[in-house]
Image (cartoon, rainbow, N blue to C red):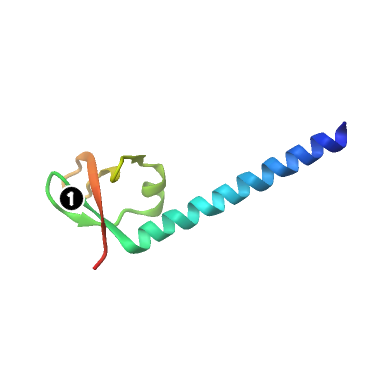
Amino acid sequence: MELIANNIIISVICITTFAIIYATIIFMTILKHDHFICSNCHYEFKPKYVTLVLSQNARYGKVLKCPKCNTLCFMEELKDK
């Protein structure tokens, strides 16, 4: 019984670790290749990694706070040129 419990715990730890690594790679890719544009003042910026991870997701962008006008609104995600 202990062997099964240990195997389950090890499996959960491995899957969680893989999910965290995968999410980090995805967010780093977004941060490297994309920028966001404020729908209020049209200011283009790249958010910090922590801000990107903790922000709310929307269908084609994120809900972020603009560093220029300090408005919390939907930000469209655009590819860098």
Residue position marked by numbered label 1 in the rendering: 68
Looking at the image, the residue that sits furthest to the top is 1
Coordinates of residue 22 in the picture (x, y in percent): 53, 53
Residue furthest to the bottom in view is 81
In the image, residue 64 sits, relative to residue 24, either above or below, namely above
Please provide percent x and percent y for residue 28. 43, 58
- Report which quarter residue 31 is drawn in: bottom left
Q: Position of residue 10 (x, y in %)?
A: 74, 43
17 over 6 or under it: above or below? below
In-front residue for pair 18/44: 18
Residue at 30% across, 44% down: 62
Q: Is residue 67 left or right of residue 56?
A: left
Number of residues whose C-alpha sits closer than 10 Å to that of mark 1, classed few (under 14), some (14–19) or many (20 or more): few
- Label 1 element class: loop
Report the residue at 79% width, 41% height from top: 7
**Residue at image coords 48%, 57%:** 25
At x 36% / y 42%, what residue is drawn? Answer: 55
In the picture, the quarter occupied by the C terminus is bottom left
- Count all numbered tags in the image, as a single digit: 1
Would you identify the image quadrant in which residue 27 lies?
bottom left
Q: Residue furthest left?
A: 41
For the N terminus, give its image quadrant. top right
Three-letter code, disc 1: Lys
